[in-house]
Image (cartoon, rainbow, N blue to C red):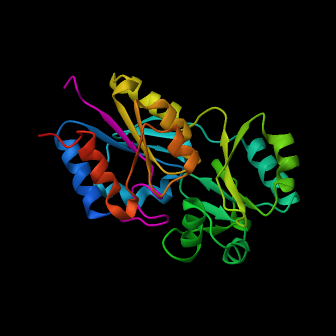
């Protein structure tokens, strides 16, 4: 159909409450109606394949995973770009040398520093990414100890620390290859963010799917809540930020919709005419 739209959904804080794997019933109904109207709906997330896999049962048309490092349309892999072994070793070494807590995400396993849970339990407040990791360590998302990392290809590192000074040397050594995507935090919360390979991002992942399907980026919609969604919001034709999201992302978006806990996706799909007749 000539008016087919492509819809890209962040997970944590957008499709689901942070760290959860069950979207609101209203969101699932809206997604099904949008697909029945001829549109295609994709996950567009920083999560690796293992962490997003529980959501695939809901019938998405593909994914931009690992912040753009692993892109799939239907069952076809369009892009697969892990770090090199040298990059992975350098990331782990310089972060640990500066006391920065980190997780390392491969396609099928996520590894985390053994005392990360104790660190997070002592932090007040945060954002959707912090809440995701709190829940990941205690509930639904399996994290293996970093000491078990076996050298398999890694796509992304998540970082957490108390002071920007701890990131000075990591930036000096790594910024040529990685973007430091730091989240907005309250005055007393820990710094947290992601190291994303400069070879990709969520926006470029979206463009790969657009090219594959022959759909103009003008006919795309992106929904997110945090600054790791910025490239998605800047790439799509219509960018939507959740009311529970980053204030900076709201300023960059075409519109703001209600929070994930207030049927935000369903209300936005309806307001944007994505549910068909």
Q: Residue furthest left?
A: 277
Task: Pick the quarter of the image with the C terminus.
Answer: top left
Q: Main secondary structure of the magenta part?
A: loop
Answer with the quarter of the image where residue 41 lies.
top left
Answer with the quarter of the image where residue 173 lies.
top right
The answer to whether 169 is drawn above or below residue 116 in the figure is above
Relative to 63, 171 lies left or right:
right
Answer with the quarter of the image where residue 212 lies.
top left
Residue 70, horizontal then vertical, whole percent: 51, 41
* Magenta stretch: includes residue 15: yes
Say which residue appears at 63% left-offset and 32% top-offset: 199
Work out whether residue 252 or residue 229 is closer to the camera in this orientation and state it.
252
Q: Is residue 268 visible?
A: yes
Say which residue appears at 24% left-offset and 40% top-offset: 274
Q: Is residue 59 visible?
A: no
Task: Pick the quarter of the image with the N terminus.
Answer: top left
Per the rendered image, the range of residues in magenta is 1-22
Residue 256, horizontal then vertical, whole percent: 42, 46
Say which residue appears at 67% left-offset and 65% top-offset: 112
Relative to 29, 109 lies left or right:
right
Residue 123, horizontal then vertical, whole percent: 69, 73
Work out whether residue 244 or residue 153 is closer to the camera in this orientation and state it.
244
Say which residue appears at 22% left-offset and 43% top-offset: 34
The answer to whether 38 is drawn above or below residue 186 in the figure is above
Residue 146, horizontal then vertical, whole percent: 71, 65
* Magenta stretch: includes residue 256: no
The answer to whether 68 is drawn above or below residue 246 in the figure is above
Work out whether residue 232 or residue 58 is closer to the camera in this orientation and state it.
232
């Amino acid at each position: 159909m000539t008016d087919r739209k492509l819809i890209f959904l962040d997970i944590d804080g957008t499709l689901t409450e942070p760290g959860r794997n069950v979207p609101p019933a209203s969101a699932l109904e809206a997604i099904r109606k949008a697909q029945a109207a001829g549109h295609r709906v994709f996950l567009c997330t920083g999560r690796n394949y293992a962490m997003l896999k529980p959501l695939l049962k809901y019938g998405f048309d593909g994914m931009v995973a690992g912040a753009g490092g692993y892109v799939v349309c239907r069952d076809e892999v369009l892009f697969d770009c892990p770090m090199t072994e040298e990059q992975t070793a350098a990331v782990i070494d310089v972060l640990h040398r500066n006391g920065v807590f980190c997780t390392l995400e491969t396609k099928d396993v996520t590894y985390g520093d053994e005392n990360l849970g104790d660190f997070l339990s002592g932090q007040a407040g945060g954002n959707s990414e912090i809440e995701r990791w709190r829940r990941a360590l205690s509930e639904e998302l399996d994290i293996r100890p970093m000491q078990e990392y076996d050298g398999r290809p890694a796509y992304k590192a998540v970082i957490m620390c108390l002071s920007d000074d701890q990131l000075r040397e990591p930036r000096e050594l790594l910024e040529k290859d990685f973007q430091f995507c730091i989240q907005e935090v309250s005055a007393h919360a820990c710094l947290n963010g992601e190291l994303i390979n400069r070879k990709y991002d969520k926006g470029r992942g979206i463009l790969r799917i657009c090219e594959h399907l022959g759909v103009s980026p003008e006919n795309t919609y992106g929904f997110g809540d945090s600054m790791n969604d910025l490239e998605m919001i800047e790439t799509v034709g219509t960018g939507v930020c959740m009311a529970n999201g980053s204030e900076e992302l709201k300023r960059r978006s075409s519109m703001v919709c209600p929070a994930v806990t207030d049927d935000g996706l369903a209300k936005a799909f309806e307001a944007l005419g994505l549910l068909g007749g």
